[in-house]
């Protein structure tokens, strides 16, 4: 017999719930989220603070939510909007009539990760004669390249970046190219630190070796060209660079569209051809997909189309100027605080800083900033690079810049007073000696409980701790492979069904 009290508490009640009550539940759930608007969240969301833009995007999404991108002949509206977005992205990135890349083509994807997976897939499939394909990436390349290599069974050759410039050496990138290399990648800019790789030199080395070169401009590709027009010295990175064969750019970042829209561009249709998947050897419809998904809602694409049309070229130039000024103000705030230093002079929309010798514990500082309403992104140490704090800056941050400096100074003072996180000796020993293979579910549950993550096998995990410094310190002390395993297990504890 069904326990209706349990069913009522879940997503599938015995009797339907009135619409307004359902919306109230959603609002109640959202109340515990980080704020997506207001300029105090420095990661994950991109807010231009343009009045009415959310409502326009939601209305456009609603108009096309049930349109299916599986068959463009049935829904030509979606095809038209996709082609328009590809054309807009190409124009921003130096392609189109009258340029040195007049034949650029592209596809709309669900996000940067899908765009990068497809870039790798396309390069791999262009060389079926290579039995064990490889790709070359700098260590600062987005983790989605590693995900693509894992999914597609492509070897990943990682070139370290300089601890001073945070960029790869073009000669080292060139030396990493082998006969089996099908793709060389670089970033414009890298997500972690916001610096632009030496794209021209890397692309030239790839071209000399007869290898494709992909520029991951998912993060900043929409805003770097506007910053250049405003007078900033943005290095060459787009289709004006010979040897660049493909570029990805996310519209749900600095084009300020709602989540779920990226564009993957290829210099010409011949280069794009291996991206497609077609299958006719079954009794159903012939499947032909330019991207990974088959069924795709038209909602996100329509929302992106409406956003780009509404803001226009002049709107994006204005938003880039506002963001540039916000970046400069935040960087000045960091420079003014003893114990902190910038990881790099900002050249895009990122402010990234770390602690100097004798400075505050960065993970404690992040918690202190959170307590003051600033949601930043801590980054763990890696291969000689120190732990750091990442700020993704959007136009919405500009009105808040004057508040950030005093709060940062106050947070640093509080972090110094609290002192660094000190792990118990036994925990330090365990983390130092433990291997991913030796980690058992029981050990994970015990460790999670000790870190305030809670959770028991077969039950929903407890809430996250208010302060994450201890968790981040444990992860920072662990080798990369152990970090990965711990995070997988921690997230698994959190993702339990509500019955």
Image (tube, helix red, strand yellow):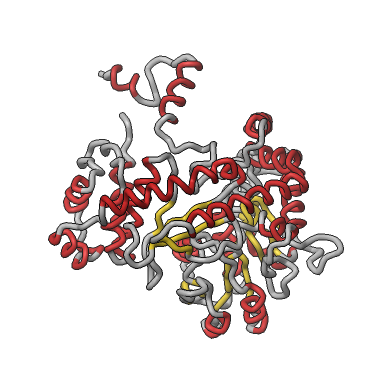
Residue at 48% x, 65% y: name it.
343
Residue at 72% x, 72% y: name it.
241
Q: Where is residue 319 in the image (x, y as percent from the top left)?
A: 68, 46
Q: Where is residue 350 in the image (x, y as percent from the top left)?
A: 54, 57
Residue at 66% x, 55% y: name it.
223
Name above or below for residue 441 compared with residue 498: below
Q: Where is residue 105 in the image (x, y as percent from the top left)?
A: 74, 59
Screen quadrant of the N terminus: top left
Residue at 71% x, 41% y: name it.
305
Q: Which of 255 and 229 is in front in this view?
A: 229
Q: How many labels does the image show?
A: 0
Q: Does residue 355 appear left or right of residue 181 in this picture?
A: left
Q: Does residue 391 appear left or right of residue 214 in this picture?
A: left
Q: Nearer the viewer, residue 357 or 374?
A: 357
Name above or below for residue 244 compared with residue 492: below
Q: Would residue 438 be seen by someone viewing this image from the given angle?
A: yes
Q: Residue furthest left?
A: 426
Q: Would residue 280 be seen by someone viewing this image from the given angle?
A: no
Q: Say which quarter of the image contains residue 196.
A: bottom right
Q: Does residue 347 appear left or right of residue 192 in this picture?
A: right
Q: Which of 183 and 270 is in front in this view?
A: 183
Q: Does residue 102 appear left or right of residue 360 in this picture?
A: right
Screen quadrant of the C terminus: top left
Q: Position of residue 228 (x, y in %)?
A: 71, 61
Q: Say which quarter of the image contains residue 328.
A: bottom right
């Amino acid at each position: 017999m069904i326990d209706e009290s349990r069913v009522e508490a879940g997503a599938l009640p015995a009797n339907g719930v009135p619409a307004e009550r359902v919306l109230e539940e959603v609002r109640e759930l959202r109340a515990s989220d980080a704020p997506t608007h207001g300029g105090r969240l420095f990661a994950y969301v991109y807010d231009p603070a343009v009045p009415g833009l959310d409502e326009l995007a939601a209305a456009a999404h609603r108009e096309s939510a049930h349109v299916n991108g599986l068959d463009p002949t049935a829904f030509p509206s979606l095809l038209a909007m996709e082609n328009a977005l590809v054309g807009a992205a190409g124009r921003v990135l130096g392609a189109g009539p009258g340029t040195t890349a007049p034949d650029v083509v592209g596809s709309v994807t669900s996000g940067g990760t899908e765009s990068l997976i497809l870039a790798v897939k396309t390069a791999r499939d262009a060389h079926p004669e290579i039995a064990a394909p490889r790709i070359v990436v700098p260590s600062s390349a987005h983790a989605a390249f590693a995900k693509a290599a894992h999914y597609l069974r492509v070897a990943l050759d990682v070139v370290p970046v300089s601890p001073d410039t945070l960029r790869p050496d073009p000669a080292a990138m060139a030396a990493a190219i082998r006969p089996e290399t099908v793709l060389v990648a670089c970033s414009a800019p890298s997500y972690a630190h916001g610096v632009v790789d030496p794209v021209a030199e890397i692309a030239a080395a790839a071209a000399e070796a007869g290898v494709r070169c992909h520029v991951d401009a998912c993060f900043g590709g929409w805003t770097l060209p506007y910053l250049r027009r405003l007078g900033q010295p943005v290095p060459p990175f787009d289709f004006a660079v010979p040897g660049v064969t493909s570029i990805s750019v996310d519209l749900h970042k600095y084009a300020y569209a709602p989540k779920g829209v990226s564009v993957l561009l290829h210099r010409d249709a011949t280069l794009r051809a291996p991206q497609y998947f077609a299958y006719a050897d079954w009794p159903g419809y012939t499947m032909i997909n330019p991207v990974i998904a088959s069924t795709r809602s038209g909602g996100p694409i329509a929302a992106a189309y409406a956003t780009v049309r509404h803001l226009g070229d002049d709107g994006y130039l204005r938003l880039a100027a506002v963001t540039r000024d916000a970046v400069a103000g935040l960087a000045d705030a960091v420079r003014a605080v003893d114990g902190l230093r910038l990881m790099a002079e900002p050249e895009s929309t990122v402010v990234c800083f770390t602690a100097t010798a004798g400075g505050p514990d960065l993970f404690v500082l992040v918690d202190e900033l959170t307590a003051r309403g600033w949601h930043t992104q801590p980054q763990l140490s890696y291969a000689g690079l120190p732990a750091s704090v990442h700020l993704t800056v959007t136009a919405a941050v500009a009105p808040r810049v004057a508040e950030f400096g005093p709060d940062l100074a106050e947070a640093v003072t509080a972090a110094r007073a609290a002192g660094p996180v000190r792990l118990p000796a036994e925990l330090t020993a365990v983390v130092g000696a433990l291997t991913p293979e030796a980690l058992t579910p029981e050990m994970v549950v015990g460790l999670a409980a000790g870190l305030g993550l809670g959770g028991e096998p077969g039950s929903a995990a407890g809430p996250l701790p208010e302060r994450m410094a201890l968790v981040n310190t444990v992860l920072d002390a662990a080798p990369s492979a152990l970090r990965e395993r711990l995070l997988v297990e921690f997230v698994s504890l959190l993702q339990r069904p509500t019955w």
